[in-house]
């Protein structure tokens, strides 16, 4: 199963127009075409499901958004402004775009709070240990109540589900930069039933209280239908399509 989730906080001033728009995006790897004229938009305050089979290019699209991968052609517009090249992860973070990976980006030999400062260098400086311990613990408590993870634990000593919890919590640690787009790649693949429920409960509550919207990208239709409060605008494109979850009463 492959997939991702994208979350976007509505911009200041209550504007709920398109925050991200992909138009005619293409990407090939050698002779393999990952994306073919992909069009997709995500508005502030919406929850969207994106469904597609393995290898359909869903994660590639998100890697382009987060600056990890460059598109061969096409346009990506964030906040009404076209992304210019060179465009990498530092620029994406300045735009407020973050990603939690399915293939975990955590350093296994470091402790949880040490990974926090690696992912958020702005948190460094005098007192960084206490600061990072507090911030990562606060986010873990916020998303996964009762997680049982110590900020002093070495990543390699955690279960796969616990590592995924840390990966997700790391993505929303406040570090002085905005969080407008949150990409969660296969967030439920390693989580058990209860942590997965907690994650989606958190996202739904954040949408209500903070204007957070998210996009669930998955190859399993039932997964998107159950957890994606908005599934709309069914449209096939490079083997995936988006659907409006409100049709399911979510």
Image (cartoon, rainbow, N blue to C red):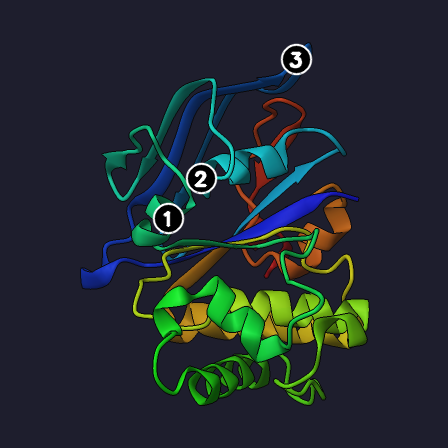
Name the side, left or right, on which 191 lies relative to 236.
right
Q: Secondary structure at mark 3?
A: loop
Mark closest to the chain's N terminus, 1 or 3: 3
Vertical side of 103 occupied by 241: above or below: above
Q: Residue at the spot x=69%, y=53% of the render?
A: 102
Q: Residues within 10 Å of mark 2 (few under 14, many from 20)?
A: many
Which residue is more in the foreground, 217 or 88?
A: 88
Q: Secondary structure at mark 2?
A: loop
Q: Which residue corresponds to mark 2?
A: 67
Name the side, left or right, on which 225 lies relative to 23.
right
Residue with the most extreme left position: 13
Q: Which residue corresponds to mark 1?
A: 90
- As measured in the structure, the alpha-carbon distance from the residue carrying label 3 to the one carrying label 2 is 20 Å
Name the side, left or right, on which 198 lies relative to 62.
right
- As measured in the structure, the alpha-carbon distance from the residue carrying label 1 to the one carrying label 3 is 27 Å
Mark 1–mark 2 contact, CB under 8 Å? yes
Which part of the image, by quadrant, shows the C terminus? bottom right
Q: Residue at the spot x=38%, y=74% of the render?
A: 123
Q: Residue at the spot x=55%, y=46% of the render?
A: 244
- As measured in the structure, the alpha-carbon distance from the residue carrying label 1 to the one carrying label 2 is 8 Å
Q: Which residue corresponds to mark 3?
A: 30
Vertical side of 212 occupied by 101: above or below: above
Q: Do we see residue 215 in this rendering?
A: no
Q: Secondary structure at mark 1?
A: helix
């Amino acid at each position: 199963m492959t997939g991702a989730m994208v979350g976007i906080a509505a911009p200041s001033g209550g504007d709920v127009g398109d925050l991200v728009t992909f138009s005619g995006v293409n990407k090939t790897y050698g002779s393999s075409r990952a994306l073919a004229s992909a069009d997709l938009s995500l508005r502030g305050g919406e929850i969207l499901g994106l469904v597609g089979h393995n290898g359909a290019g869903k994660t590639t699209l998100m890697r382009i958004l987060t600056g990890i991968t460059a598109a061969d052609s096409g346009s990506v517009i964030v906040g009404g402004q076209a992304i210019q090249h060179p465009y990498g992860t530092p620029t994406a973070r300045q735009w407020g775009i973050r990603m939690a990976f399915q293939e975990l980006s955590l350093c296994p030999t470091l402790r949880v709070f040490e990974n926090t400062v690696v992912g958020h260098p702005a948190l460094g400086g005098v007192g960084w240990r206490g600061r990072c311990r507090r911030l990562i613990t606060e986010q873990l408590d916020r998303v996964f109540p009762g997680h049982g993870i110590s900020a002093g634990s070495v990543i390699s000593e955690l279960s796969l589900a616990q590592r995924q919890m840390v990966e997700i919590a790391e993505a929303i640690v406040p570090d002085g930069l905005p969080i407008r787009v949150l990409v969660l790649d296969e967030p439920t693949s390693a989580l058990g039933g209860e942590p997965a429920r907690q994650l989606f409960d958190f996202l739904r509550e954040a949408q209500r209280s903070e204007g957070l919207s998210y996009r669930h990208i998955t190859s399993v239709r039932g997964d998107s239908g159950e957890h994606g409060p908005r599934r709309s605008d069914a449209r096939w494109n490079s083997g995936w399509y988006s659907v409006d979850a409100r049709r399911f009463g979510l």
